[in-house]
Amino acid sequence: MQKRFLFFCTGSDRIPVGGLKSMKFVIQKHGEDTEQLPSAHTCFNVLLLPQYKNKETLKEKLKISLDNAEGFGLM
């Protein structure tokens, strides 16, 4: 699950040469409570999270996003 999260946010499932402490990572609010899934700007290591009502909804939506992060035959 950690590798999927890293891939979703950065576009790579590999840890940088300098380790995770060398990587800048940003979590940013992305709109009000909606049914929208989390998204990411992989070039800038930014995770965009809508403001969900509770942690269970956040966990569910993030899991859906991580499970479906691959597409268009790129991998």
Image (spheres, rainbow, N blue to C red):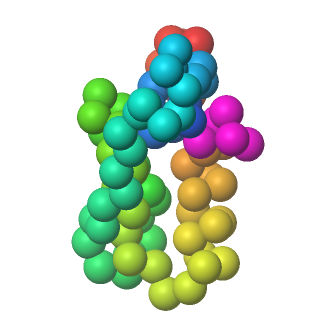
* Residue 68 visible at all: no
Q: In the rendered view, does 41 fall on the left or right side of 7?
A: left
Instruction: Decide: is 16 above or below 47.
Output: above
What residue is drawn where x is 46% and y is 25%? 11
61 vs 46, left or right, is: right
Q: In this view, does 16 lie above or below 30?
A: above
Residue at x-position 45% and y-position 59%: 37
Return the residue nearer the eye: 15 or 42. 15
Residue 44, quarter of picture:
top left
Report how many numbered discs are placed on residues in the image.
0
Above or below 29: residue 53: below
Looking at the rendered image, the quarter that the N terminus falls into is: top right
Residue nearer the viewer, 54 or 15: 15
User: Measured along the vertical axis of the image, is residue 36 above or below residue 72?
Assistant: below
Q: Give the quarter of the figure containing the C terminus.
A: top right
Q: In this view, does 70 lie to the left or right of 9?
A: right
**Residue 75, magenta (yes or no):** no
In the rendered structure, which segment of residues is drawn in magenta?
1-5
Q: Position of residue 68 (x, y in %)?
A: 59, 39
Residue 33, x across and y down, in percent: 37, 80
Magenta-colored segment: predominant secondary structure: helix
Taking the image as shown, residue 22 lies to the left or right of residue 15, namely left
Look at 46% across and 79% down and name the residue there: 52
Residue 59 appears in view: yes
Which quadrant of the structure image shows residue 7? top right
Most extreme residue toward the bottom is: 53
Q: Residue 64: where, in percent of width, then height?
A: 62, 53
Farthest right residue in view: 1
